[in-house]
Image: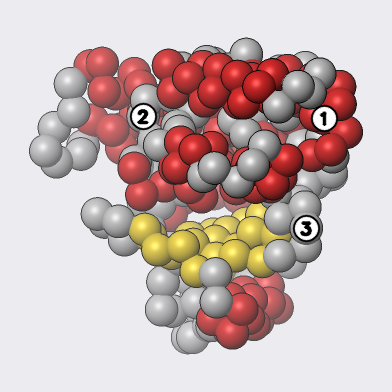
Amino acid sequence: MGDGVEPESSDSLRTFGAVLQALREHAGLSREEFAEQVRFSKHTVASVELGRRMPDESLVEASEGVLGNTGALRRAAVHLMRQPGLAAWFRQWARMEATAITLYTYESRLIPGLLQTEAYARTLFTQQLPPLDDDQIEAQWAARSERQKLLARRPNTAFGFILEEHLFRRRTGGAEVARELIASVLDIAELRNVEIQIMPTVRESHAGLDGPVQLLETPENKWFAYCEGQRGGLLVAEPKEVSILQQRYARMRSQALTLEDSRSLLQRMRGDL
């Protein structure tokens, strides 16, 4: 996670950590010896065992190899979640997102969660059907706020966003919420590891008309994609399919406004509110 900041613990994280520690001790390995074998730092292993950190998928696989390939860790990891508030279909992607070295997002429906302000996000939560109760809304915002820390925690991760212009023109939540949102996006765009481009409304066609897509590169330089609908999400791992989506995203980067022109457009839209 970096900077010594780690996610809020949960029963599932603590349980997984306790199982990992028990298996390690049963194998007669010190934490330092185990860390060396799985090629993770001693600090990372300690954080996972204490239930303070979501285990990376590669750590789970390496641990299985070192600890006898029982399958216990692999099966337990499927049920892990950082904290309440993440949709079940999104949790696997969220785990991968936490360690990715590249994250690209094209969105045509709403502002991506990583860029949302609290006021904007709460507007979305209060409009959901079936309606959410207060505890569910708080849990959803807590989970979203936690994810947003990735932008600062991972300065070596490249984040790219292509956003349709109409997402800001809609004024979701009202003019004041929209003004705050645009100001926040402009601030985020100043980060060295973040690129934000606007796809102008006045563009007859572009490569993303089939819908939103996210692309992710793992520390092992493997690429995955994620496509989400109203009630579910699809993780795409087949290299041929991922390649097609990469080609579309690359084309969209050339079809969207430049970084400078995108910033200028956002500033003008903020001034119009």
Circle 3 residues within 10 Å: few <14, some 14–19, many ≥20: few
Residue of label 2: 85
State the residue lying farthest toward the left: 130
Instruction: Name the residue: 69% across, 46% down.
Output: 65
The answer to whether residue 101 is above or below residue 31 is: below
Q: Residue 54: percent from the left, percent from the top?
A: 59, 30
Spatial CA distance of label 1 from label 2 is: 31 Å
Residue type at the position of mark 3? Glu
Spatial CA distance of label 2 from label 3 is: 29 Å
Instruction: Name the mark on residue 11.
Output: none
Q: How many marks are shown on the rendered structure?
A: 3
The answer to whether residue 47 is above or below residue 224 is: above
Circle 2 residues within 10 Å: few <14, some 14–19, many ≥20: some
Q: Residue 71: percent from the left, percent from the top?
A: 51, 44
Residue of label 3: 220
Q: For the residues carrying marks 1 and 2, which lies nearer the camera in this image?
A: 1
The answer to whether residue 18 is above or below residue 154 is: above
Instruction: Name the residue: 64% across, 42% down.
Output: 68
Residue type at the position of mark 2? Gly
Instruction: Name the residue: 18% across, 28% down.
Output: 132
> 227 or 34: which is nearer to us?
34
> 51 or 98: which is nearer to us?
51
Q: For the residues carrying marks 2 and 3, which lies nearer the camera in this image?
A: 3
* Element at label 1: helix
Q: Earlier in the sequence, mark 1 or mark 2?
A: 1
Instruction: Name the mark on residue 35.
Output: 1
Q: Earlier in the sequence, mark 2 or mark 3?
A: 2
Residue type at the position of mark 1? Ala
